[in-house]
Image (cartoon, rainbow, N blue to C red):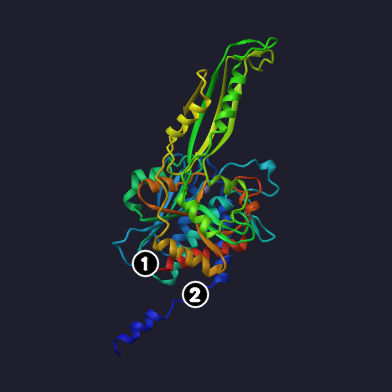
Amino acid sequence: MKLLLPFLLALATPAAEPDWADVDRRALAFLQSYIRIPSINPPADTGKAAELFKAELERNGLAPKLYPVKDGMVNLLVRLPGRDRTKKPLLLLNHFDVVPVDPKAWRLDPFGGIVKDGWIWGRGAMDMKGTGVMHLFALILLKQSGITPARDIVMLSTADEETNGINGIRYMIQNHWKEIDAEYVLDEGGFGSRDVYSSNKLVFGISVGEKQAAWVRITAKGTAAHGSQPIPENANTIILEAIRKALNTPDRGKPNPVVEAMRTNLQGQFSDNKFIRAIQGNTMSLTTLSSGVGSPVKVNVIPSTAVATLDCRLMPGVNPAEFFSEMRARINDPRVTVEQISDPADPGVSNMDTPLFRALRASILKQHPTAVVTPILIPYATDSVRLRMKGVIAYGISPMVVDAATVATMHSDEERIPVSEFHRGVRIFHDLLKSEF
Ligand SMILES: [Zn+2]
């Protein structure tokens, strides 16, 4: 017993809490430097961002590896070994690249790393440099504290998410899968909010699946003629009718288990907004319409062809071919063709009942004891779909409380996040990495 005592004491004594005031100061300064690197995609020149991460990791005793792909695109991977090496790692996934800006539209310099009135502004603050720095600091703090995590933690920062991931996640999966081979991934996707999911209720949505981008081109063929004498074979009127019928395709989707889980967790009280509507069923947006003869187009010529595209987003598990054949049947016009022009991947949704999900919920509740934590679907695409295709359980979460207006600044000319929520996000991820899963 005597011999055991020091050992037991060591187990019972929690490692000292980080000096949070110091961590907050360092993490914010780091995020400012990171936003000041204009890693716009295209061209996704992410070398400087990778060097910034590499230097910070090396300063803290970690050994990151850089993976240059081409034209300045660089991916970074770093591993912190865990106690149980037989378990596959947890992957923290973020991306270095950001979407372009229209500098004239910005009131504040998009690459200034400006902190003002409790907000940090700039391209990438929301998508997803803020979350990337949370991952980075959670990992560094774990290393500094000397705590060995339950399993290996791998962080991957990719060069190319905003285009199609070919030189980012897809490159890494194709060429370096052995170094990743994770059981779980934490990526972007969901977030916490008091208004987005349910009004006046603090809800953290963790995305466990995403919709399929199934795009379609509708072409109508008619007869070219003089605009002075209307005819029924006008390609424009044919396509208008076809689009009207297509958009009226009823959503006969089966109840989705994630939507059902949301309904239970939120007691049926969903907010009424485009995000919540979009994650409950199949959607269609008419995104392009083109026709007309000549350049500039002639007003007095009835064209023989008109073309439209619909951006259809289908629930996981819906078969696009069946969806479009039903659309064809509704249009039911031999002058109209409906072609599927994208081939979405559908790996389904990730298991919502795992030790990692429970650990994540506990870490969120520690910071926000009154929050409801629920799995959600997201209407847009992330890199997670590539990992789900490899059998990885993928969750998307930027653990900040943001309102709908702030979420809408993503990709806009007012992109920003609240500094206090950025700091809280570091604590949530740090707490998670220390826990058992
Ligand atoms: Zn993103």
SS type, badge 1:
loop
Exactly how many numbered labels are in the figure? 2
- Local SS, label 2: loop
Residue 98: x and y in percent read 55, 46
Q: Residue at x 55, y 71 (%)?
A: 20
- Could you say where residue 298 lies in the image, as x and y percent from the top left? 67, 15
Q: Is residue 228 visible?
A: yes
Q: Name the one closer to the observer, 328 or 418.
A: 328
The residue type indicated by label 2 comes to Glu
| Location of mark 1 (residue) | 150
Q: Is mark 1 within 8 Å of ligand 1?
A: no
Tell me if mark 2 has few (under 14), some (14-19) or many (20+) residues whose alpha carbon lies within 10 angstroms of its own.
few
In this view, the residue in front, 18 or 26, is 18
Question: Which quarter of the rendered picture does the C terminus lie within?
Answer: bottom left
Q: Give the vertical position of 231 relative to 21 (above or below).
A: above
Specify the quadrant of the image occupied by residue 22: bottom right
Which residue is disc 2 drawn over? 17
Give the percent coordinates (x, y) of residue 228.
70, 10
- Of the 4 image quadrants, the one containing the N terminus is bottom left
Residue 51 visible somewhere in the drawing: no
Mark 1–mark 2 Cα distance, whole angstroms, equals: 18 Å
Q: Position of residue 317 (x, y in %)?
A: 42, 43
**Residue 78 falls in image quadrant:** bottom left
Three-letter code for the amino acid on which mark 1 is drawn: Ala
Near mark 1 (Cα within 10 A), the count class, few <14, some 14-19 or many ≥20, is some
Q: Is residue 312 above or below residue 236?
A: below
Say which residue appears at 58% left-offset and 47% top-offset: 275
